[in-house]
Image (spheres, rainbow, N blue to C red):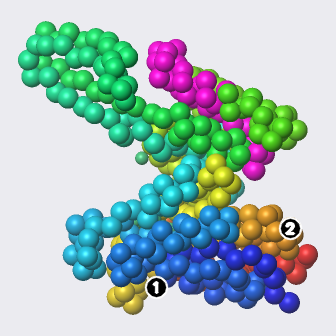
C-alpha cells in the first residue's frame, strides 16, 4: 500500500543534470512508496522563456496557496545561456523572484554523515546559517572623490523638509565614500522567519551584528530582533514559545560568535546580516565538506516553506550525460529537498506515515554513504573503510534497496 497524501506539494522542475536526477529520484525513491500528489511547474529555462517567466510567478503563488514547495536547481541566465538556449531575454533568477514574492529568508543546512568529518573537529551537529538577503552593501550607493571636498549624509522627508545633515568626512584629497540602508519591515520579517525556523527545528538561535561600533545601524537590527522576540502574537510571544521548546535566543557580537562557533559542537541556527551571511555560509559549507551535501529552505514570515539543494544545475556533468556518459553526480541535497518538503507536508496534514517515510529515506541515504557507497565528489572526503565510487543511478538503486530493508523493519 502506497502512502497517501491529502494536500499537494508544489513541485518545481529545473535544468540540466539536476533535472535528470529529479526524474531518477522520483522514479527510484518516491513513486514506488508514495501516491505522490504534486502540482507541477516546469521552471526549466525553456518553459520560463516560453511563458515570459509567468510560470515562476505562478509557482510562487501556488506555494502561497498550499504552503510547501520543492524546487530543482535552475539556470539563472547570463549572456552565454541566452545564446545557448536562444532565450528572448536574460530572465531574472527564479530563486530571487520566488524569494521576493514570498518575502522569505534562506536557511542553509549541511547534511552531516559520520564518515565525512568536518574540518572543525568539534562540530558534530549541523550549523544552519540564515542570511538576511536585503540591503546593506548589496544596495549601497558609492562615490569616488577625486579631489578635496565634503561628503554629507542628508535626510529629507517627503514634504521636502531637511530632517538631518551630518558630515561623513572632509576630504583633503582623493578617497571613497559609501551609503547604505535597510528597512525595519525587512529586518522584522527576517527576525520572524528566524524565530519560526528555530522553533520548527527546536534549536537555539544566535544572532550577531556589530552594534558596539555601529551604534544606530546595527543597533537597529539588535533592537528589532529583541522587540520581535518579546512581542505577543495572538497572545503568545516567541520568548514563551522558546521557553516551552527548551531553546534559547542569544544575541552577541559577530566576532564573539565566530570564536564561539569554532569551539562549539554545532547544532544552532546562526542568523547573519547580509554580508556576514554571504561570507559565513560559504565558509561553513566548505568546512562541512561539500556543496553537494548542502540543502536550503526558504521560510517566509507567513509560514510558507520552499526546499531545494544549495548547488546549481551541475552543468559540466550534464554535458557528459548528453554524450551518453553515466555520471557520478551526488543526488543527496536534491533528495533532502524532497524529504524536507514531504516531512513538512506530513506535519501540516497530520500524516505521520509521510513524516516517517521522509525520516527513513534520509536514514537510508546517510547509511549508504556511511557504508562507503559514494559518488565521486565524496571520494577524497569520505573516511569509510571500503569506499566504492558508483554512478548516480547505481547509488540511487543501492539506496532504494537499503530503504526497502529499513521500511520492512517498521
Ligand atoms: P554548480 O551547478 O553548483 O556546480 C559547480 C561544481 O560543483 C560542479 O561542476 C561540480 O564540480 C560540483 N558540484 C555541484 N553540485 C554537485 C553534485 N550534486 N554532485 C557532484 N558535484 C557537484 O554551479 P555552476 O556550475 O556554477 O552553475 C551551473 C548553473 O547552475 C548555472 O546556470 C547557475 O545559474 C545555476 N545555479 C542555480 C542555483 C539554484 O537554482 N539554486 C544555484 C547555483 C547555481 P565538478 O565539475 O568538479 O565535479
Ligand atoms: Mg557567497
Image quarter where the C terminus lies is bottom right
Q: Secondary structure at mark 1?
A: loop
Task: Work out whether 348 lies above or below 268.
Answer: below
- In the picture, residue 35 is in which quadrant? bottom right
Task: Work out whether 255 lies above or below 107.
Answer: above
Going from the N terminus, do you reach mark 1 or mark 2 first? 1
Given residues 13 and 53, the one toward you in this image is 53
Mark 1 vs 2: CB contact within 8 A: no
Q: Residue at x 67, y 27 (%)?
A: 226
x, y percent for residue 198? 72, 44
Task: Work out whether 351 lies above or below 303.
Answer: below
Q: Secondary structure at mark 2?
A: loop
CA distance separating discs 1 and 2:
40 Å
Image quarter where the N terminus lies is bottom right
Crowd tier of the residue under label 2, counting other residues whose Cα lies within 10 Å: few below 14, some 14–19, many 20 or above: few
x, y percent for residue 362? 72, 67
x, y percent for residue 217? 47, 23
The residue to which callout 2 is attached is: 350
Task: Determine the residue located farthest toward the left in the rendered image.
Answer: 147
The answer to whether residue 208 is magenta is: yes
Residue 232 in view in this figure: yes
Q: Residue at x 25, y 76 (%)?
A: 88
Task: Work out whether 172 lies above or below 3.
Answer: above
Crowd tier of the residue under label 1, counting other residues whose Cα lies within 10 Å: few below 14, some 14–19, many 20 or above: some
Q: Which residues are magenta?
A: 199-226
Q: Residue at x 48, y 54 (%)?
A: 100
Q: Is residue 166 left or right of residue 187?
A: left
x, y percent for residue 382? 59, 60
The residue to which callout 1 is attached is: 326
The answer to whether residue 309 is magenta is: no
Task: Determine the residue located farthest toward the front in the rendered image.
Answer: 159
Amino acid at each position: 500500500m502506497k502512502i497517501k497524501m491529502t494536500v499537494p506539494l508544489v513541485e518545481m522542475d529545473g535544468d540540466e543534470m539536476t533535472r535528470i536526477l529529479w526524474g531518477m529520484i522520483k522514479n527510484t525513491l518516491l513513486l514506488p512508496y508514495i501516491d505522490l500528489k504534486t502540482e507541477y511547474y516546469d521552471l526549466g529555462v525553456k518553459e520560463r522563456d516560453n511563458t515570459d517567466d509567468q510560470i515562476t510567478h505562478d509557482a510562487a503563488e501556488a506555494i502561497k496557496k498550499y504552503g510547501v514547495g520543492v524546487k530543482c536547481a535552475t539556470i539563472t541566465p547570463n549572456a552565454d545561456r541566452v545564446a545557448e538556449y536562444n532565450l528572448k531575454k536574460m530572465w531574472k533568477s527564479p530563486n530571487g523572484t520566488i524569494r521576493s514574492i514570498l518575502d522569505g529568508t534562506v536557511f542553509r543546512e549541511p547534511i552531516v554523515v559520520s564518515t565525512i568529518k568536518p574540518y572543525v573537529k568539534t562540530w558534530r551537529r549541523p550549523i544552519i546559517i540564515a542570511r538576511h538577503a536585503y540591503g546593506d552593501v548589496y544596495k549601497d550607493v558609492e562615490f569616488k572623490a577625486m579631489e578635496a571636498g565634503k561628503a554629507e549624509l542628508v535626510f529629507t522627508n517627503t514634504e521636502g523638509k531637511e530632517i538631518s545633515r551630518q558630515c561623513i568626512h572632509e576630504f583633503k584629497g582623493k578617497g571613497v565614500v559609501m551609503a547604505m540602508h535597510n528597512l525595519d519591515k525587512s529586518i522584522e520579517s527576517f527576525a520572524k522567519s528566524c524565530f519560526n525556523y528555530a522553533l520548527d527545528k527546536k534549536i537555539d538561535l544566535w544572532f550577531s551584528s556589530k552594534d558596539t561600533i555601529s551604534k544606530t545601524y546595527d543597533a537597529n537590527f539588535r533592537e528589532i530582533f529583541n522587540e520581535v522576540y518579546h512581542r505577543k502574537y495572538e497572545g503568545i510571544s516567541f520568548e514563551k514559545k522558546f521557553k516551552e521548546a527548551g531553546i534559547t535566543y542569544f544575541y552577541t557580537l559577530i566576532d564573539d560568535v565566530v570564536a564561539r562557533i569554532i569551539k562549539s559542537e554545532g547544532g544552532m541556527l546562526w542568523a547573519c546580516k547580509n554580508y556576514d551571511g554571504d561570507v559565513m555560509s560559504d565558509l561553513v559549507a566548505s568546512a562541512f565538506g561539500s556543496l553537494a551535501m548542502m540543502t536550503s529552505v526558504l521560510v517566509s514570515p507567513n509560514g510558507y516553506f520552499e526546499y531545494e539543494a544549495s548547488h546549481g544545475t551541475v552543468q559540466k556533468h550534464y554535458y557528459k550525460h548528453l554524450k551518453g556518459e553515466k555520471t557520478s553526480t551526488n543526488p543527496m541535497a536534491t533528495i533532502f529537498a524532497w524529504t524536507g518538503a514531504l516531512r513538512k507536508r506530513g506535519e501540516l496534514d497530520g500524516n505521520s506515515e509521510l513524516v516517517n517515510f521522509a525520516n527513513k529515506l534520509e536514514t537510508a541515504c546517510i547509511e549508504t554513504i556511511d557504508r562507503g557507497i559514494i559518488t565521486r565528489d565524496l571520494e577524497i572526503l569520505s573516511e569509510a573503510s571500503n569506499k566504492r565510487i558508483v554512478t548516480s543511478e547505481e547509488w540511487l538503486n543501492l539506496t532504494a534497496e537499503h530503504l526497502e530493508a529499513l521500511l520492512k523493519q517498521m
